[in-house]
Amino acid sequence: AFDSNHYTEHEIRRIVDVGFLLAQRRRKRLTSVDKANVMESGLLWRRVAEERCRAFPDVELQHLYADNGLFQMVRRPTAFDVIVGDNLFGDLFSDLAAAFAGSLGMLPSASLSRLADPGEISVAAPPPLT
């Protein structure tokens, strides 16, 4: 069997930018998780996140290897605010975060292509994800 983890710079930039924008609205901390120590896609992810960090000087960027990040989240969940990562790591982190809330159905994560403006948010009709 063979699995691949294909991400382009454009895709990573889009994901990381949403993370930075969310962090600006919150506690100004963004954690990027990857496996740059063993995966080429992780090296690209880390490089793009560092490049985009320059556009968000008010946000602190932290890189963690995904396995260490999960360990740290178990030890100190309140140390985290906004977390970005690829699909695999996002699944793992959102499931762990759900355990703190008590249910997988509590939506501790989201896959966003952009952030809605506050005026766009509606309880009856959520903004479309594009």
Image (cartoon, rainbow, N blue to C red):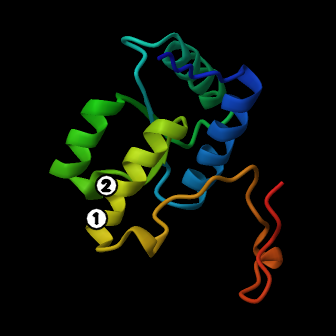
Q: Is residue 55 left or right of residue 90?
A: right
Residue at x-position 37% and y-position 56%:
95
Residue 73 vertical placement versus 121 (above, below): above
Residue at x-position 32% and y-position 72%:
101
Residue 116 vertical placement versus 96 (above, below): below
What residue is disc 1 on? 99
Label 1 neighbour load within 10 Å: few <14, some 14-19, many 20+: few
Residue 102 vertical placement versus 113 (above, below): below
Mark 2 and mark 1 in contact? Answer it, CB < 8 Å. yes
Residue at x-position 28% and y-position 58%:
78
Residue 64 vertical placement versus 8 (above, below): below
Structural distance between the alpha carbons of marks 2 and 1: 5 Å
Please, what is the three-letter code of the amino acid marked with disc 2? Answer: Leu
Q: Which residue lies furthest to the left in this view?
A: 75
Image quarter (top left, top right, bottom left or bottom right) of the C terminus? bottom right
Q: Residue 31, position in %: x, y?
A: 43, 40
Residue 71 visible in rendering: yes
Please, what is the three-letter code of the amino acid marked with disc 1? Answer: Ala
Q: Hey, which quadrant is residue 48 in on the image?
A: top right
What residue is disc 2 on? 96
- Checking the image for residue 77, the label placed there is none
Q: Residue 99, position in %: x, y?
A: 28, 64
Q: Hey, which quadrant is residue 6 in on the image?
A: top right
Q: In this view, does 54 lie to the left or right of 116?
A: left
**SS for tag 1?**
helix
Residue 30 visible in rendering: no
Q: Residue 77, position in %: x, y?
A: 26, 55
Q: Residue furthest bottom?
A: 124
Q: Residue 87, position in %: x, y?
A: 54, 39
